[in-house]
Amino acid sequence: MEKYNHKYGAEQIQVLEGLEAVRKRPGMYIGSTSVRGLHHMVYEIVDNGVDEALAGYCTEINVVIEKGNIISVKDNGRGIPIEIHPKTHISTAETVYTVLHAGGKFGGDSGYKVSGGLHGVGASVVNALSAWTEVTIARDGGLFQMSFEKGKTVKKLEKIGESKTTGTKVRFLADDTIFESLDYEYEVLEKRLREIAFLTKGLKITIEDQREETPKKAEFCYEGGLNSFVEYLNKNKEKIHPKPIYIEKGGEIPVEIAIQYTTSYSENIYTFVNNINTIEGGTHLEGFKRALTKVFNDYARSHNILKEKDNNLQGEDIREGITAVVSVKVKEPQFEGQTKTKLGNSEVTGVVQSMVNEALSTFLEENPQVAKAILEKCVSASRAREAARKARELVRKKSNLETSTLPGKLADCSSKVADECEVYIVEGDSAGGSAKQGRDRKFQAILPLWGKMLNVEKARADKIYGNDKLNPVIVAIGAGIGSDFDITKIRYGKVIIMADADVDGAHIRTLLLTFFFRYMRPLIENGNVYLAQPPLYKLSKKGMEDVYCYTEEDLEKSYKELAEKGIARETLSLQRYKGLGEMNPEQLWETTMNPETRILIKVTMEDAIKADEIFTLLMGDEVEPRREFIQKNAKYVKNLDI
Ligand code: 0R9
């Protein structure tokens, strides 16, 4: 049996120190040690397989969540090189797994490494943060294996058999002393793998969850690439033209774009850089938007759809109802913004802009039917915008939107320093009453909402300004909506949605999140939107301080902890809260509003996108998918009033 043994040299000692640094500050390398970071461990390994696919050598990647939360990722590429590396004097494969950033540095990246997780840190970080890792390589007719514990080599690469195929398989168990939890969410991994498959035309990706009795499975492979992505995003929407518009260009900065318009009023543009979702946009999005506005205006002018006297269509008119995916590959991407998901490379704007200018104007000339259908929609959006402006002015005059008249239902706080102020948007009048009494009026404002909400899916901005449910929310926040929205004017640093933990509460939450997502998006991007988490249960006993539990697991944990203190389960009385209204003001303060003890969940763009998707499904025009969703989720949506 061939062995790749070697003494540790100076480089190897440095290596161990490097991986020790990763274990000391895991957050710096993997983003966080929450489940989010845990999922990134999987993406890092999958990305290495995707790189091999982009280099043209791998056609399939298989991901398995094995029992005990062990992850296995296998690709059918060339296999990681096994020969002794001239610099480290150990096998290249071991080098990749033990030297920080070695994948790129040691030239194994096919010269053009474009894929990469959020942090692009690679195999050695995953290895450092795993209780154990096992790597099996099929290459040169042999099967080779090596293994590690907490980043340290415990079995050097050795030949364990023969193989007729080639490929790499990595199995690892994330270290539970580093991560808060090892519970992978199948749906989260599935969604990301589907996304990668859309972004990597022709690559087959499978996922299997073996943790349950009946394993969950999915397989993704899209020959249509981004076209399939856009069709998937629009599957429940009414399309304005049958096929997505597809543009692609190679070169130094490859760009791939698919566009399809629907009859909806929202704008859904998803952008990716090296397969990473750039939620905050950036220079590629900027270039895309500029070109879109110019091409449609030029076409409308030259085909007399816009007359000489007419104003140009504005960007937002042209983007109403658009679903688009923009994917670019950049060799040295600069990520900026709060969550480091905004592309900063200035050279990308011009590249995207000129390629869209050219390809889209050619497409419109060659497909006049499609051009006409889209422009009709844009012109109608522009008229609606004009109507909205008038409605807004009317409302402003009526209710002094921009001056001091706040909604009558709002119990405002006394502080005027937005950063320290919070507004609780509370479902129902009775909960609103308790919240008003229980709050700290210095910095907490309460806005009760009641009755049936407006369906924002079916309304344009003009209807929203005049709406008696949403108008108080807009006025209380004080920063306008849509393209008028000005984050510097917000009156509260925290906008907190407080709704019951039942289906009606979920309905209100979905509605408000969708509204914020569509009309006050910077509020979510800036991290100002929160969900309050009221307790589900109260455990009490004479002489004992009440114990509040926020989840089922929380309740079980509390029972256990109290039992350890000699308080038996049978002696405790359990109250289940059906709604916020059941709590008195003091209880509401203690459990849900006191900054010292409450639990607040910060809403991310991903939450908002999910809410928007559910919303489109529930409120949109397509009946069949809605029926399917309700049937599938019948036990949760029994009381949902739609
Ligand atoms: C299951 C996850 N897959 C991987 O981690 C993986 C890495 C990898 C790879 C190469 C091929 N397949 C891979 N799968 C590879 C091979 C060759 C050149 N470049 C890349 C070759 O045969 O010449 N590697 C990624 C980094 C490295 N290999 C290297 F640094 F070791 F070269």
Image (spheres, rainbow, N blue to C red):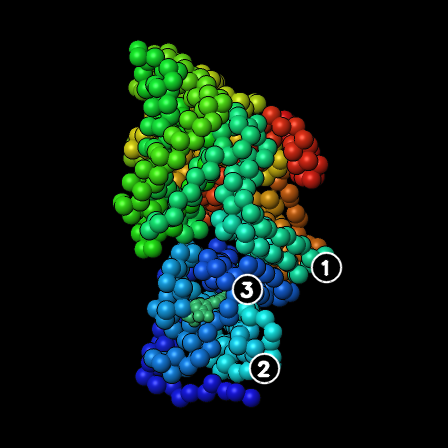
**Three-letter residue code for mark 1:** Glu
In the image, taking residue 297 as reference, residue 614 lies left or right, namely: right
Disc 3: which residue: 75
Mark 2 C-beta closer than 8 Å to ligand 1 = no
Q: Position of residue 183 (x, y in %)?
A: 57, 59
Q: From what the image shows, is residue 519 above or below residue 203?
A: above
Disc 1: which residue: 213
Marked residue nearer the N-terminal end (2 or 1): 2
C-alpha separation, residue under disc 3 versus residue under disc 2: 19 Å
**Three-letter residue code for mark 3:** Asp
**For the C terminus, which image quadrant?**
top right
Question: Is residue 455 or residue 81 the one in the foreground?
Answer: 81
Q: Residues within 10 Å of mark 1 (few under 14, many from 20)?
A: few
Question: Is residue 145 or residue 129 the one in the foreground?
Answer: 145
Q: Which type of secondary structure does the marked residue at label 3 adopt?
A: strand
Mark 3 C-beta closer than 8 Å to ligand 1 = yes
Disc 2: which residue: 160
Question: Is residue 26 or residue 353 the one in the foreground?
Answer: 353
Q: Which mark is residue 531?
A: none
Task: Name the residue rendered at 69%, 57% in the picture.
Answer: 215
Q: From what the image shows, is residue 234 above or below residue 469?
A: below
